[in-house]
Every structure is written in structure tokens, then in C-alpha cells.
Amino acid sequence: MNLKHYLSIFCTVLLGSTYLFASKPNVIVIMADDMGYGDVGCYGAKPKNLKTPNIDRLAKEGLRFTSGYCSASTCTPTRYSFLTGNYAFRRKGTGIAPPNGPSIIQPGETTIGDLLKKAGYKTAVIGKWHLGLGEIGKGPDWNGQLKPGPKEIGFDYNFLLPTTNDRVPQVYVENDRVLNLDSNDPLWVGNKKPSAEHPTGKTHRETLKMDWSHGHNSTIHNGISRIGFYTGGHAARFRDEDLADKWVEKSEEWIKKNKKDPFFLFFASHDLHVPRIPHERFRGTSALSYRGDVIVQLDWCVGEIVRILKEQGLDKNTLVVFCSDNGPVGDDGYQDGALEYMGDHKPAGPYKGGKYSIFEGGTRTPFITWWPGKIKPGVSDEVVCTIDLATSLVTHAGVPIPQDSLIDSLNVMDVFLGQKGAKGREHLIQQDNGGRGNFGFRKGKWKLLRHAKKSARNIKVEEKLATTSVDAITLFNLEKDQGETKNLAKSNPQMAEELNAELQAIIDAGRSR
């Protein structure tokens, strides 16, 4: 074997190792909560209402998707689908998780975290969880070990808001314990009023610093009444205004600790979910009252994540994905000025509906990918979804996917990276919370809506939640009618029948990958 041959082998190995390193970028998924397509500047929000310079900079330097979706129009099913790569409607119990709900993802169900760990990634989730904790049939042991939780399904570290902040309890969970819990003041969480004198939003309404409009009127903490009841755990309770700062603080700690290895961070913001309580320094920074102010706060978080990456020299080897778990909502249980100060702001942009609905506004959201030096700045009209992040990232990292895992997650990594000629999804199923059997089905320019009941919630996010009459089957041409205003089901019954049959076939098949 001559020298030339040895050099050839050496170069092959060297290039191979370089490719291997390049195929394992750090990944940070920043998931907003209840953010609509039109809620940021780069998607049409007017500067006179609010400014989002950091999110806009991601879009300017990266790839902004005009057909980027989450898979459901409420938070728990979207988060389940993002982590497992499975449509949430295929699994019972994936609706909005209650305060004492068990872990929806139990050990043994493959997640993006499991598979990325096999590729050598360090993994963490920091922020809102809302996927339950504890064993099925038992739920969370708030005063003991909260297992199973993220650490049992693929995450090395977690720092969580365990449910969602309009639901009790207002405590942090670090790994498998409630942080700062005093054993002499045990935490109790329940569905019934613990005692006749227990203060609630109904009995002590005059003490609230943010009044409720519907539903959120049980236990009071920090001047805000919530869904559900709890007592004790006073040393562990947090102040709502500090959530965003805490997510950034813990993310910076974890990134610095794990920067020598490839890492995957799920940064799960609670903004813009109710109760919308921005830190004092963000009050009045928008013209949209508290709802706009928490958008500005979220934008600050995005800027902080980028700052951390640049300061640690990690930005050139980190893929950042910005997305939302569902579309927008105005009044979602609190009187926070969201409707009164909406003005000419269109949180869903040009689209109809919002949170809770299968119209485009419920699941078409901001979606941006950013990787300096790897992703060329631009705009993509290809259809992508948060459910596809699992298969795309895992495949890019070189890990084989088990046959019965990530069954609805497609590999569209080339689209995420903006590769020329790359194609996104051919079709996408959209669901609401899952319990009503309502589905949206997009294929190319066509959008079919199938409502199990002839009613739909929250058709207009600029108004209060309402029930509106709808047809069981509707068909829209999104190319000509992005606002879903002209039902073509009667004038084009063949297309409606074909799409409805294809939708049902994918549901019946039990998988789409």
C-alpha cells in the first residue's frame, strides 16, 4: 500500500469525522405559548403595537416559514406530539393535563430525548411542562419523588413549571423534586376546596390584583386565583413575575455546564399563556396591555439565549428553532386588557380562528430556524410542523428510529436547513384538544375541516370565547382564500370526499411515517 493510498484513507477519515461533528449541532427549541402567526414583527405585527427585535433578527438571519405549524391548537397535545413524534389524537389522555395528572409519556415510550441521548447529546427541558408527573393511577407525589417525569423519558435535567400557571401549584420542580419544599409545610393539591374558609377567587374576589373572567376562580396565590386547589409549600412558591428570568438563568447555567458536548435544550416558555404577568421592567412596553408586554418579555428571552450562545462561542454550531404550541387567544380566563387593547392588532395574522380551533389560526404559527453559517437567510413556503422535529433531528444525528416510534414525524431536515429543492410535508392533520373529534387536513392548497359536532369554539380571537355554528365538512382553497371564508364543499364535492377519505385512511392506518 503506497503513501498516496494512506493519504486517501486519512482524508476520508478526517472528512468523515468532520461531517459527523457537523451533523451533531447543538439544538435549542424555543416554544412560545399561545403565540399567533401575527404576534411578531417579522410576521406582520405593527411596531406601533409592539416590537420584537430579537425574534425578527432570528428571521432575518435564518429561515422564516410561512406554513409552519404545530400539530394541535392546545398546549398539552402539541407538546406530546413534539416529544414523541406521534399525533396526540392516537393516544387517549393527551388533552389538557390537570394539576394532579400522571405523566402522559410513560417510560418505554420513545421520545426525541431518548434518541438524541443515543447520539451523545446532553438533554434538558426548562420551562413549562404540562405533560403530567407520576405514575398512572397515582399522579404526582408533590412531597416526594415526582417520578416518572422528564428524567425517565430522555432528559438528563429538568427545571419545570409542572403544569401551566393558571393551574395549581405555583412551584418549581427541579429534576424529581419540588424545589425548596419544607417538609414541615407539606404541599397538598386537590380538586375540591380543602376547607370552608379557604380563600378563593369567588370568596375573596376583592383582594385579587388580576380579576378572573371565567373558570379561574379557585385557590389564590400572588393575588391571582387559579384552576384547582392547593395548600402548604409556601417556601417553594414562586412569584409569577419572575418566571421568564428563571428560565433564562437556568438555561445559562445548564448550557455553560454542558457546552463541551452536543446538547438539546427544550426552552418551554410560559409566555403568552394566562395569567399574563410580565416582570415589572416589561410593563407598558407594548400598546397591547399585558398580552403585548409578555410578547416583549418573550422576545427578550430569545435575545438572551442568542447572547449566551455567542458569549460561549456556540452560535456557529447551534440550530435554534422558534415556534409556538398553538395559536392565539384573547380572553382566556382573566381580565387582563387583552381584548380592550387589541386595537388593529391581528394576533392570528390573516388567518381565521385561534387556540382551541382547527382553523388555520389555531395551528399555523411563527416558525423560524436559525443556524449561522449553515442556514441561508430567506423565506420558505414549505409545510413543516413541530411534530417533524423529532425524526428530522434524530436522523440528522445518525440514530436509527425504531419501527414503531415517531410514527407521524417526517424527516424534513433539509427543509429546516433551507436546502435548495427540499420539499416539506405533502399533508398535515391538525387537531384541537382531541376530545371533540375535530380535525383539519391540509394537502397542498386544499384545507378540509371535519367537525364531529356542528359547533366550534373561538372563531375570532379578537372576541371572547364563543360557540359558533359550523358545517360538519368544509373545504377551502388556501391559495385563494387564506382566511377560510368560502366553503367549497358543495361546489367541489369530489375534492371534499377525496380529502375526507384520505384523512380517515391516515387515522385508521395508525401511523403516517
Image (cartoon, grey):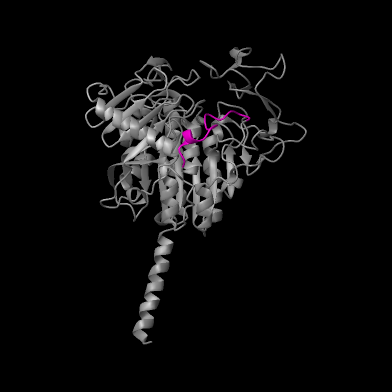
For image coordinates 39% across by 29% down, the residue present is 439
Does residue 173 lie above or below 497 as drawn?
below
Q: Residue at x 40, y 68 (%)?
A: 16
Please tell me which residue lies in front, 5 or 226.
5
| Main SS, magenta residues | loop
Q: Residue at x 29, y 50 (%)?
A: 422
Residue 485 on the magenta segment: no
* Residue 356 locus on image (x, y percent): 43, 25
Q: Is residue 395 in view?
A: yes
**Quadrant of the image containing the C terminus:** top left
Total residue callouts: 0
Of residue 329 and residue 12, the one placed in the foreground of this image is 12
Tell which residue pokes out farthest to the right in this image.
184
> Quadrant of the image for the N terminus?
bottom left
- Answer with the quarter of the image where residue 249 lies: top right
The location of residue 195, given as percent across then percent down, is 72, 17
For the point 54% across and 39% down, the residue is 127
Q: Nearer the viewer, residue 144 or 55?
A: 144
Magenta range: 86-100
Percent of width and height locating residue 180: 68, 38
Say whether residue 477 is visible.
no
Instruction: Judge from the rendering whether residue 149 lies leftward or rightward of residue 184; answer left or right.
Output: left
Say which quarter of the image contains residue 443. top left
Residue 499 at what x, y percent from top left?
Answer: 31, 32
The answer to whether 65 appears left or right of 129 in the picture is: left
